[in-house]
Image (cartoon, rainbow, N blue to C red):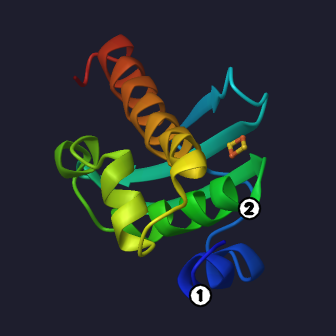
Amino acid sequence: MYNEKVVDHFNNPRNVGDLPDADAVGETGSFKCGDTMKLYIKVKDERIVDVSFQTYGCGAAIASSSMLTEIVKGKTLDEAMQVTNQDVAEQLGGLPPLKLHCSNLAADALHNAIAEYRKKQEVAGKG
Ligand code: FES
């Protein structure tokens, strides 16, 4: 059902766990299945210098989160905002159609984390 790349990211997830000195955290959940995800980002000069995730979900959600962290590490916030669930699924070599919604979680959590970071900057008068 899953290709080798997906299985690898599920069995050996990259950047898993919380990030104690994160600048922002994005949370999201799926109405379809109840799975949830948290994505932590550390930002320096508008660039994501570190990122990690915690996912309580299916294998596709875990593999998507893991792949997403690899895609966005080192990207600027603007570049990271452009990353879509299709990008994540493509980089994974595709997901079964029934599992495509799982890659939404990762992209949504990332976008929420960036929105949270920007809100904090605004409040601090740095936005
Ligand atoms: Fe819930 Fe995949 S089945 S995120």
Decide if residue 24 is on the left or right side of residue 59.
Answer: left
Could you say where residue 42 lies in the image, as x and y percent from the top left? 47, 52
Asked whether the viewer can see residue 22, the reply is no
Label 1 sits on residue: 4
Q: Nearer the viewer, residue 14 or 77?
A: 14
Indicate whether 20 appears above or below 15.
above
Point 66% across, 28% down: residue = 30
Q: Residues within 10 Å of mark 2 (few under 14, many from 20)?
A: some
Ligand 1 shown in quarter:
top right
Q: Nearer the viewer, residue 10 or 78?
A: 10
The quadrant of the picture occupied by the N terminus is bottom right
Label 2 CB less than 8 angstroms from ligand 1: yes
Q: Disc 2 residue type?
A: Gly
Asked whether the viewer can see residue 7, the reply is yes
Could you say where residue 6 lies in the image, as x and y percent from the top left? 59, 75
Label 2 sits on residue: 59
